[in-house]
Amino acid sequence: MNKSDKPGIDHVTLAVLQNGLNQVCNEMDLAFQRAAFSPVIAEAMDRSDGIYHRDDGALIAQGELGLPIFVGTMQFSTQTVIAQAKDLKPGDIYIVNDPYLGGTHLMDVRMAMPFYYQDEIFCWLSNTGHWRDTGGAVPGGFSASATEVEQEGLRLPPVKLYKGGVVDDEIQAIVLSNIRVANETIGDIKAQAAALRVGERRLTALLDRYGRDVVEAAIDEMRARAARQMRASIALIPDGEYNGVAWVDSDGVVDEPLKIDLTIEKRQGDLYFDLSKSSPPCKGPMNSVIATTRSSIYLAMKHIFPEVPINAGTFEPLHIADPVGTFLYAEYPRPVSGCAAEVSQRIAEAVFAALVSALPDRLFAAPAGTSGNFALGGIDQRGDKPFVMYLFTGGGYGGSLQSDGLSNGCSTIGISTMQPVEVLEQRYPVLFREFALREGSGGAGQQRGGFGVRYAIQMRQGWGRASFVMDHGRYGPQGVLGGADGAVNEVRVVRNGETYVPPHLSKDQGIEVGEGDIIHVATPGGGGYGQPRLRERALVERDLRRGYYSLAEADELWGEEGSSGTTDG
């Protein structure tokens, strides 16, 4: 008998419980967001919450409002916590940010709490929040030229921050003494713990209503169905091997590109991923820990098959060989600050490039593929106090068979958005001189890429140090099936009237800026899809009317060979 046909777990109950578990996670997301002090969590939503299996940490449910890159990494970090947990009791909360123990970079701090029901552990609740600072060589933690992880900030193994519901003041003091904006971070710590307690209350209510046995049966069935749905989607891909390549501009230390060389084999209904031909470990912070490498592939496949529900079963048909000996399998003490926000997107780009020929109606040209990590820290003279501002920006999505790419879309790894300009100007000593669409930055194609953005930030007073860990400054996002690449990322800093361009194009650290200095950033556009000559003339004319291109630019990109279609889009 199918589990869903058992008494108490009919199809309707199964659907209700699946949505109920997701809703528990959504409420944790909202509680975390609303209570957090830092704008990067409260406004930009750089966080995630989930429910994980009590034995192996496998993903049961995750909030719809959290970053997809954390989908895979949190189950790996929860596994580590479970393996090291001792003397557990209700109210215990572990904190961990060690990248090598199922993490990303040091700024992504995870908390995990055993959830008790009827005096037994039923599951674990876990969340991740991006802290603006965890110490290290530069404010914000994005040390573009770090050569060892200690230069990137404080590294925490799994330790009990809360014991029986009470914070351990000594451990918290150690954490806060290593952070530049400690007083503000206290609010984020409390918000993160409060979100877990919200999940505890909501999950208890769900279990009280339906019973432990019914909910556990639903969890098992959800996992089995997700695996079947993913395999049904994979069946759309013909058996065979597919290769995709993506490039990281440099590691921030050695000015040479890093290659991601991916082979995907489809056989017997599953997919097998081989990254072993990628570049060796690098000196700078663009190494990726294995949890992030795996999660990057997971989120790429979820982009391709968004209809498959998300839990551990989703990943069962995806077999990823450990790319030991490459920069995608970072081991201590390799620096990793760029792995989650940058390298992860290059890995996803390689997946898209590999499978676009097999699924041309589902896939798309490469998106902007960089989070545009920019951190500015220094002294705010308004209160004579330290500040750390961290922001990331959107870029163009790649064109697809159905349409042009979205402009100013969020990064590949998440739903997070840049904090509002008004909030940043209120909280920090900066003024936005420009924030605009980067017209013409999308790659030409039958369906062009979406546009990135341009912004310029001026220091109003005080002083600061600016750091960048971005990418696609050397190579623009890939066009596919004959489409052109999108425009590259650009960074320049104007100090005392002189312009400085980072030697690594979009990676640098500790650039001193003072009153009146301006930082200019232009984010990449998405790649183009299909041959530019096949673009409908009506679409070219629409872009001209909207001022996206000059007549000369449009003629150079599309010439006189567009079709005579009349659709105005």
Image: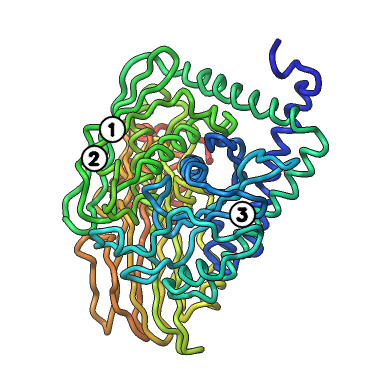
Secondary structure category for the residue under label 2: loop
Q: Which residue is mark 1?
A: 275
Q: Earlier in the sequence, mark 2 or mark 3?
A: 3
Question: Which of the 4 image quarters holds residue 276?
Answer: top left
Nearest to the observer: residue 270 or residue 562:
270
Q: Please state which of residues 28 and 545 is positioned toward the viewer in this rendering.
A: 28
Going by the image, does 48 lie left or right of 194?
A: left
Q: Residue at x 41, y 71 (%)?
A: 178
Residue at 51% in and 89% down: 383
Q: Residue at x 27, y 84 (%)?
A: 496
Residue type at the position of mark 2 = Thr
Nearer-the-camera pick, 143 or 496? 143
* Disc ID at residue 219: none
Name the mark nearer the viewer: 3 or 1. Answer: 3
Q: Outermost residue toward the top?
A: 1
Front residue of 162 and 446 = 162
Q: CB under 8 Å between callouts 1 and 2?
A: yes
In the image, residue 547 above or below residue 494: above
Q: Residues within 10 Å of mark 2 (few under 14, many from 20)?
A: many
Q: Which residue is the site of mark 3?
A: 92
Q: Secondary structure at mark 1?
A: loop
Disc on res. 326: 2
Counting labels gives: 3
Q: Position of residue 37 (x, y in %)?
A: 59, 69
